[in-house]
Amino acid sequence: MSEAVLVIERSENVATLTLNRPGQFNALSEAVLEALQTALDGIAADASVRAVVIAGAGKAFCAGHDLKEMRANHSAAYMQGLFRQCSQVMTTIVRMPQPVIARVHGVATAAGCQLVASCDLAVAADVARFAVSGINVGLFCSTPAVALSRNMGRKQALEMLLTGDFIDAAEACRRGLVNRVVPLADLDGEVRRLTLAIAGKSASAVTMGKQLFYRQLEMGVDAAYQLATETMACNMMCDDAVTGIDAFMAGHRPVRRED
């Protein structure tokens, strides 16, 4: 049997999805996108999973779309279907209740950089590099531009898109593409610390908070505050908030209830 293009692992209440095409630098083939979509849909419906990590096997995190597969299916209908499939994976990451963290140990280019930008958080090794390099072969990275422009300043994002130049992990952190940069040897430990810190929080608060965060970004300030007010009031009615506030007022740490 051929090896799975996506490896799914569970440790405590964290699910790790590892892109597993190291010989192709984890390019996002149709099979990979389908496997990612299926896995993310399943995890989104699983309340026992509190955080998700997306990683890559081999030297690269993800080198973008599978260009050989694309050239072998050169029609407008195929391209529209492929990019629609990829966009669905990216929006699923944003809309699913659990926070999704990218573990970036190597190169992330084009749709691979889009994947990093689509994740809620990202931790990178200091040797990781990032680019949206389609422009170098006559292809503007339009779909990666959606996620990239929502993570960094417009001029910084557009410079990457227009030049195709690589930036290193430190610069990616300065621009807001990743949250933390650590030596490669420390990457797993840093990802684990971040995921467990999030997984230990109230699941209801994290879910409501993530949904509110992304929805309000697309609103005017008045509508954003209206939505935030409704979300905050709803959150205050949750058992986790009631017991947590009571514990804080009593001077001790709240005990999180397992769902």
Image (cartoon, grey):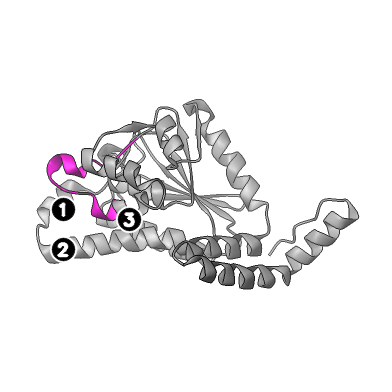
Residue at which label 1 appears: 70
Question: What is the magenta range?
Answer: 130-144
Q: Position of residue 165 (x, y in %)?
A: 26, 34
Do the CB atoms of the residues marked 1 and 2 lie less than 8 Å apart?
Answer: yes
Q: Position of residue 138 (x, y in %)?
A: 12, 45
- The magenta stretch spans residue 141: yes
Q: Quadrant of the C terminus?
A: bottom right
Upstream in the sequence, badge 1 or badge 3?
A: 1
In this view, the mark in front (1 or 3):
3
Q: Nearer the viewer, residue 7 or 234?
A: 234
**Label 3 is placed on what type of residue?**
Val
Q: Is residue 63 visible?
A: no
For residue 192, what is the image quadrant?
Answer: top right
| Disc assigned to residue 78 | 2
Relative to 156, say whether 144 is above or below.
below
Residue at which label 3 appears: 146
Where disc 2 sits, the SS reads helix
> Label 3 vs label 2: CA separation?
21 Å
